[in-house]
Image (cartoon, rainbow, N blue to C red):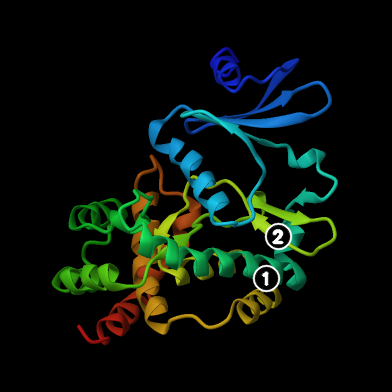
Amino acid sequence: MDILKPELAKMNVSYQSIEVIQNKDGVIVARVFCDNRSLILKFFQRYEFAREIENYKILTSLNIPTLQLISATNRALLMEDIQQSNTHRLGTKEDLDNPQIAVLIARWYRLLHQTGYEYLKQNNTVPLYDENEVITEQNIEEMKRKTATAALPVWQLIERNFAHIKAYLNKVKRTITYNDFYHTNLIVSRDSASAMMFDYNLLGKGYAYADIRNVCYSLSPKAQKAFCMEYGQYDAFEKALDDVVSILITLHFACQKPQFPSWANFALADLNSNYMNKVNRLLSYTK
């Protein structure tokens, strides 16, 4: 595509051809064929998605394992093509059922979180994506309307205690969070010694348990157990907070779609069942 050629020119990359792999939601991913190898070019048509460029740089500076970054402009990234790698492979759906792979994933997340605490302490003004920012009174009104659940008593409980919930979010310990776990974003070493995540569009700041929940949701029960044992302890308050906040975040993003998506049905079901208990459990913490 012609829109990609100027970015490659800025990077001084010589190539024979370009093959577009994906063009979706404002991001173009293409395979660039050079003399003796291929590389992956990621071009951001939407300005807000270009944050991934800086995210790669942050993780590299912190020695968090990532894809090898070859070059970058203010709108594009050029990375190694993992399909040509002799040492790593792309994740598979079967990996989600493998306890050994789950242990490797836990090690990457633990390193990300442990390093992220110190990074945010020293760089608390760096603008990072924060999905918790969607928790607003206006967005809650929209959720109630679009899900036709305004009559549920739990909404009144949330509205009466909204300031407390926001206070909990403001005081919870923050780190760098990945926020987008799935096997399509996973890379595993061929010797099964390590694993890492890639695609950092949703990487940002948050509380660690949100990532733990996000990973475990996709893993099989035996892989979940292996992940949690390797990752180690988590903060019980973070879980109580996440039990409430994650449902609101899921419903918010679902309500942005023209039609309510199936991937958010679990949140709607929870809203109609156990959600009141979760909100009360959170509010039982000292205000």
Q: How many numbered marks does the figure carry?
A: 2
**Residue at position x 27%, y 61% in the image:** 149
Mark sitting on residue 220: 1
Q: Secondary structure at mark 2?
A: strand
Give left or right: position of 166 versus 211. Answer: left
Q: Give the quadrant of the N terminus.
A: top right
Find residue 13 and report its horizontal and vertical position in percent: 66, 20
Q: From mark 2 to mark 1, how far is it between C-alphas?
A: 17 Å
Q: Could one spot residue 76 in this view of the protein?
A: yes
Residue at 54% x, 51% y: name it: 61
The nearer-to-camera label among 2 and 1 is 2
Q: Is residue 156 visible?
A: no
Q: Is 179 drawn above or below residue 85 in the view shown? A: below
Q: Residue at x 66, y 65 (%)?
A: 105
- Residue furthest to the left: 160
Residue at horizontal 82%, vertical 50%? 87
Q: Is residue 162 above or below residue 252?
A: below
Label 1 amino acid? Answer: Ser
What residue does disc 2 label? 195
Residue 156 in picture, x, y percent from top left: 17, 71
Marked residue nearer the N-terminal end (2 or 1): 2
Residue 104 percent across, percent down from the top left: 70, 67
Amino acid residing under circle 2: Ala
* Structural crowding at the residue carrying mark 2, measured as other residues with C-alpha within 10 Å and reported as few (<14), some (14–19) or many (≥20): many
Q: Which mark is residue 98?
A: none
Residue 78 x, y percent position in the rendering: 62, 32
Using the image as rendered, state which of residue 87 and residue 2 is in the foreground.
Answer: 87
User: Is residue 113 left or right of 151 when viewed as pictured?
Assistant: right
